[in-house]
Amino acid sequence: MTPLLMLVIAAMSPSPAYVDARDYPLPGQGAAAFAGMEQALVRGFDDICGDTFCEGDYGNLRALQLRCAVTARGGIVAECAWSFAGSHATVTGNDPLPVVEARTWICRVPLAPGTPLPVLLSTLSGRDALDTRLPGRDISAYDALTDCL
């Protein structure tokens, strides 16, 4: 395939409607800001987990990854999902292999329609990110997690 033909094919390909927030406005350009927001949320989760979500069978509950899809043109957040995992293991007297019950959760972060990515990033990057009201909503990420986990 010639370079000219490859350019023509690329130009004819439709651009995606949504991109990962880490790749907005261009691939990799939003990674640092998004990582800062995610770290603030995870820090908040880790601080309260032992007294809330991590009681019971899944005492080792961990935040795995937060991902948000934004419109490729305009950077409006379409949806965000935060994944979690936990397990519970026991050893029975008759079997050398521990019995492990593992579970994962995918929790939506219910943002108001039309939330611009910069607003989300600035709102949830502070010290109390988990308890901060979501942009345009009367609930926090913590409130959303209580409905999910």
Image (spheres, helix red, strand yellow):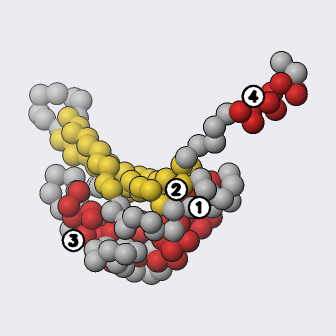
Label 3: how many residues lie within 10 Å, few (<14), some (14-19) or many (20+)?
few
Q: Position of residue 46 (x, y in %)?
A: 36, 67
The residues bearing labels 2 and 3 have C-alpha atoms spaced at a distance of: 33 Å
Determine contact: label 1, label 2, CB under 8 Å: yes
Q: Residue furthest top?
A: 1
What is the secondary structure assignment of the residue under circle 2? strand
Residue picked out by circle 3: 51
Label 2 or label 3, whichever comes before in sequence order: 3
- In the rendered image, which quarter contains the N terminus? top right
Residue positioned 22% across, 52% down in the render = 58
In the image, 45 versus 16, the foreground residue is 16
- In the rendered image, which quarter contains the C terminus? bottom left
The residues bearing labels 4 and 3 have C-alpha atoms spaced at a distance of: 55 Å
Residue picked out by circle 2: 70
Residue positioned 83% across, 24% down in the render = 5
The residues bearing labels 4 and 1 have C-alpha atoms spaced at a distance of: 25 Å
Q: Position of residue 44 (x, y in %)?
A: 37, 72
Amino acid at circle 2: Val
Residue positioned 12% across, 28% down in the render = 94
Left or right: 102 in relation to 39: left
What is the secondary structure assignment of the residue under circle 3? loop
Residue picked out by circle 1: 74
Q: In the picture, residue 108 is in which quadrant?
A: bottom left
Residue 72 visible? The answer is: yes
Relative to 139, say whether 14 is above or below: above
**Which mark is nearer the camera, 2 or 3?**
2
Q: Residue furthest left?
A: 93
